[in-house]
Image (cartoon, rainbow, N blue to C red):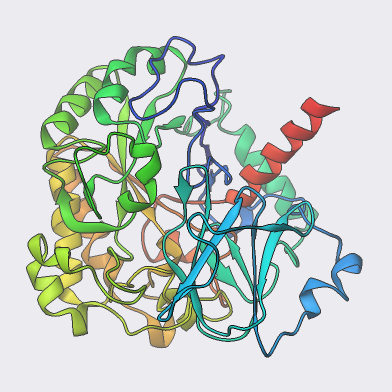
Amino acid sequence: MKKILVFSSLALASILAGCTVPHGVNSSEDVSSSKEATSSQEVVISSEKSQSSGDLPGKSSEETTSEKSTEVITDHLKVYCETSWENIYAWNSSGTITAAWPGNPLLEYDKDWKYYEFFDYTSLNLIFNKSGKQTADLSRTEAGAYYYYQDAWYDKNPLEDKPVQSSEEESESIESEESHSGEEGSSEPGLRILHCFDWNLSAIENNLNDIKNAGFDAIQTSPLQMPKDYNSSWTGEGDNWWKIYQPLSFSVASTDWIGNPSTLKSLTAKAKNLGIKVIVDVVANHMASGNNNAEPNWNISNYEADIYNNRSQTFREYIKQTDNSTKETVWGNIGIPDLNTSNSIVQNRVCSYLKELIDDGVSGFRFDAAKHIETSNDGDYASDFWENTLQVAQGYASNKNVDLFAYGEILSRCGGNRKFSDYIDYANLDAVTDNDTGNNLRDLIHGNSSS
């Protein structure tokens, strides 16, 4: 049967009422952090057929026929974003375009989108932000209307045109979910993963007994690589989550907001005694930005000299990222310098990092932005990245009697004509995420609770 896993939000206070609020999170706030406060609830699936039925939030196809899907702008920029953001800050080489930080208030468009229009500009840099949280530095270089959704740019509304499953596919998805309910005939119970987003490792360890008693058998940490702009005086990792997703290294950071080798080994040792897997979020698609979205941060040279000194080969030239084609999906820049994951220097360093994590007691990986890393089935854009990294690490783990679980983040769709199943069949991941199902479930719960 297919593996299906659902991330449980940290907002499940009724389940984890006994847990200490982790350092860096205000106890008066909702602690269900994720990339922008768990705006995307992930469900992990193992093939394309396990995608959920039902539509994404948004207008019907009839309502959008003459609206956003046909919007054509040729002489200025218009940007849309999710309604969770409040302000937009913009600048170019001549200086600031909006008001001083945090910029100008975003305008309401509909229940799914806010927007802002720059009538005198066709190229600029921008940041969406709200009360201490912000995106990475983003940019648009051509006139048009663009949608920024779940850390990626789209040329049209990504909430439209979601494929509708056949009844056969829907039945199979339901059957798969039921097969992991613990009833007789289930080949495997499935992992119940608590996504400890932005918890430092000591806080996770201190709460392991409560996590175990709440029914979880795995936890997932934030990335442990050396982050961009680390400063020990900045104690609120929650405000710096986006920097944690812009790494400078392929090794466990010696000092970081989240943890270090010592706290990682302590966590994994206690977790092993309790029968809890420790899964680490691995960032391998990109590294930290410098002066612009395509330029690697010079501090990478302090941690990964070979990658930085050979950056003309280890990073890709800027290509606008969209989901329209395989090339733009796997070679496109998502707002951060894109690693050339076909390069042997990059592959060797990623593989070394995965082995280091295994040696430190880690028994699972979540690959951030996995859909932007090519598989060996991607035609002219294929590479042997997964064969030379994950699959080597899987053999390494097996030799050490470690039951390794690995899955990849795929937001909404794979891009071009690619399939979810490619990441199972060719990358050899155990599962991939289906955030659409999580979003639909979240919206259903919110709708029921308000009725």
- In this rendering, the answer to whether 378 lies above or below 25 is below
Q: Which quadrant is home to the C terminus?
A: top right
Between residues 306 and 125, which one lies in front from this camera angle?
125
The reply, left or right, for residue 35 in relation to residue 265 is: right
**Residue at horizontal 39 percent and vertical 32 percent from the top:** 196
**Residue at horizontal 46 percent and vertical 43 percent from the top:** 132
x and y, in percent, of residue 332 in the image: 43, 77
Q: Is residue 221 visible?
A: no
**Residue at horizontal 31 percent and vertical 81 percent from the top:** 316
The reply, left or right, for residue 132 in relation to residue 82 is: left
x and y, in percent, of residue 105 in the image: 64, 56
Q: Is residue 360 visible?
A: yes
**Residue at horizontal 33 percent and vertical 85 percent from the top:** 317
- In this rendering, the answer to whether 415 lies above or below 312 is above
Between residues 136 and 10, which one lies in front from this camera angle?
136
x and y, in percent, of residue 422 in the image: 47, 66
- In this rendering, the answer to whether 380 lies above or below 106 is below
